[in-house]
Image (cartoon, grey):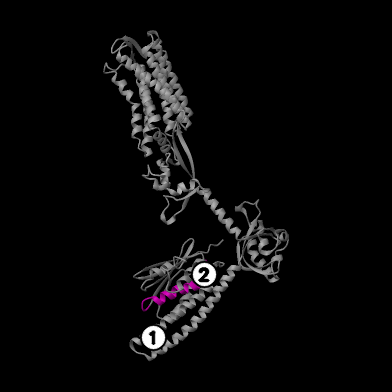
Amino acid sequence: MNTVGQLYVGVFALSGILCLAAITRARQFDDPSVRRGLVWLLATSGTWALLKTAFFVLPKPLREPAYIVGLAIGFATVWAWLYFCSAYTGQTYHRNRSIRRLSVVVFVSVVLVKVTNPIHGAYFSTTEVTAPFTYLAIEHNVLHWTATGLSYVLSAVGLFLIFQLFLESGYNTRPLSGLTALLGLPVVLDIGSQFTPWLIEVIYAPIGVAAFAIGVLFVFDRRFLAVQRTASSEDLSIYLDERGRIRDYTNAAREVIPELDGSTGDRLSAVAPDVTDVIDGDDQIIERQDADESEEAEEARYYFVSTGSLTLGDTGAQVIQLSDVTQTERQRRELAERERKLDEHFVFRVDLDGRFTFVSPSIEEFLGYSPAELEGNQISATIPNEASTDRAWEQIEPVLNGESNKVRDFPLETAAGTTVFTDIRAVPIYDGSVPREDRTPDDIIGVQLMVRDATERRQREGLISVINRVLRHNLRNRMNVITSYATMLEEKLDGDDATKARHIGDTADRLLDLSESAREIENNRDLSPDLEPIDIVPVLNRTVSQIQLQYPEAEITIEAPDTVVANTHERLETALWEVLDNAAKHGEDPPSVDIDVTVDDTSVAITVRDSGPGLPEMEQEVLRSNTETSLVHGDGLGLWLVYWIVTSLDGETKAESSSAGTAVTIRLPRYQEA
C-alpha cells in the first residue's frame, strides 16, 4: 500500500480511536439524555471508522462484508445524531414514541436493503482498482444515493436544531458553530469524490464526528456545557467559574437580575451582591422588582437561591439557581404578620350563651386568670359591672347577625379587681361543615374576640388631650389680648403704622383659626368610625348655607343629583366645611366656588373648584400624605383635618391647582344595598 493508502488508513483509524476514546469523557456528562445520545454517536461513528479502516487492510474476501456492516453502523450514526441533537437542544423528539417507532421501521428497512446487496446488487457494486492506491472501489447505485439523501436530510434536521440553539443562546458560539460545521465537511468530500480522482468514493462522515467530539469534549467543553443549559432551559441560572466569575446566565435570570447584562467575566459578588450575600445565610431569599411591573404598581417578587455544579470530567461550573417562590413567600410573610398581630392580642372565643370556649394562654399575664379558670364561665366574669355587661351584649348582637364589630375602651376586670381598658374586635364563628358561600347567621356557633390592651394608647391620648387643651386655652387667651391691642392701635395710628397693626390682628386671627382646627382634630382623632349610609346632598346644602352666612359675597353653585347616598359618617360635614371655607376665603374678589357631585358604580366624588390663586404645592402635598416633614408642611391645620377625616371614612382626597384656581376632590365609597 502506497503513501496515499496509508494516509486513508491512518485518518480513519485515528478518527475511530478518537471517537471511542472520547466515550469515557462523554459518560461524565450530567444530563442523562444528552450523555446517552453523545455516547451512541461516538460509539457508532468510532466503530464505523474502524470498519472503514478494516475495509482497506483486510484480505479481499472480507472487505465487502466489512463495508456492508459499516454501512449499517453508519446509518445508525444518523439516528444517534438526531437523538443527541434533540436532547442537547432541550427538545422531546427523542422521547416521542411515535417518532421512535417510525425511526425503527425506517432504520430496519434501509439496513435490510444494504445487507442484502450481495443478492440484488442494487445498492453498490465493487471493482478492484490500483489508483490512487490498490483498494476495492465502490460504485454506488440508485438505492445508495436514495439512502444517502435521506441521511443528509435527517442530519440537516439535527444541524438546524443545534444552530437554532446557538442563535437563541445569546452566547458567543462561534467556536461551537465552527466545530458543528465540521460535521458537514465530509459531505463536501463525498460530493468531491465524484469529480476528482484524488478522492476515493467512500463516506467520510466519521472524520467530521471525531473532530466535533474532540472540540466539544476537550477544547470548548465549558462553553458546550453552558450553552446547552443556558438556551434550552427556562431556569433562572447563573454559571460561575472556580473563581466566582460569571461565565454565563440564562435569559430568564437576566430578566430578573438586569445587572447581569454584559457582566460575563465579572465577579458575581460585584454585579449582584444581594445574591451572593444570601447563599451562605439562613434565609436564602432575595427580593427583586419584577421588570414587567410598572413604576406606579411596584410589586416585589421573591426568589430562593441555591447552588449546584455541572461537571464534565475535570471541568466544572458552579451553578446559582433562582427559584421563584413569590406566592409561597408572600403567604409566609402574611402569616408572619398575622402572627405578629395576634401576639399583640388576646383571643377569646365564646358560645351563643356567652360562655368562654377558648382563652389564649397570654391572657393570664394580662388579667391574672388562667385559661382553665375562665373556660366554661360567662363573659361577665371578666367585666367589672352590669352596665358594661349589657354594653358587651349590645356589641355582640350585630356579630350574631353575621357582621364584624370593633369596640374601643371597653373595660375588663383583672383577677386582682382592677379595671383595665381594651380595644376589641369581634367576628362570627360559623359551623365549619357549611360551605362559605352558603353560610347564614343561622350557621353562627360563636364569637371570636381579639382583645388588645388600650392602656398605653389611652395614656398617650390623654396626655395629648391635656397638652392640646392647655395650649389652646393659653393661645386663645393670649391671642385675644393681641387682637384687642392690635385693634386699638389700628384705630389710633395712620398710614403704614395702621396697616402694620391690622396685619398683627390678622395674624392673631389666623392663629386663633389654627387653635380651632386643632380642637376639631382632637374631636375627630378616632380613625375607625362606624360607617353608615348618608345622603350627602342635604349635608352639602347645609354646609353651603353656613359658608354663605360667613362669606355673603361668595357665589357658590352646586351640580348634584337629587339623592347621593355614600357609606360615610356625620364627621364628613367638618371636612366639607374646611374645603369650602378654604375656597371662599382664598378665592378672588368676589369668590366663586363650583361644587360638582358625581357617582359611579363604587364611589361618590365631591369636587370643589375655586377661582383663587391656586393651592401651593406644599398644601397639595398635605392632601396626598399623612406625614409632615421639614419640607412638607401646611400653613394651617385645616387641610390636615380634611385628610384625616376623609381617610378615616375609607375615602381619598386629590388636589389639582392651576392659574385658574384649585379643584379639591373628596372621593367616598358609595353605599351598596345588600
Residue type highlighted by circle 1: Ala
| Secondary structure character of the magenta stretch overall | helix
Seen at 41% across and 12% down, the residue is 65
Which numbered circle lies on residue 501?
1
Q: Quadrant of residue 8?
A: top left
Q: Amino acid at mark 2?
A: Asp
- Sequence-wise, the earlier of marks 2 and 1 is 1
Pick the front one: 203 or 462: 462
Q: Which residue in the structure is indicated by mark 2?
A: 535
Marks 2 and 1 close (CB-CB < 8 Å): no
Residue 47 place in picture, x, y as percent: 42, 19
For the residue labelled by badge 2, is the local secondary structure a helix, a strand or a loop?
Answer: strand
Please state, as top left, top right, bottom left or bottom right, where the C terminus lies in the image.
bottom right
Q: Left or right: 368 with respect to 148?
A: right
Which residues make up the magenta segment? 567-590
Examine the rendered structure and indicate whether residue 562 appears above or below residue 5: below
Q: Residue at x 37, y 35 (%)?
A: 166
| Extreme residue in the bottom direction | 492
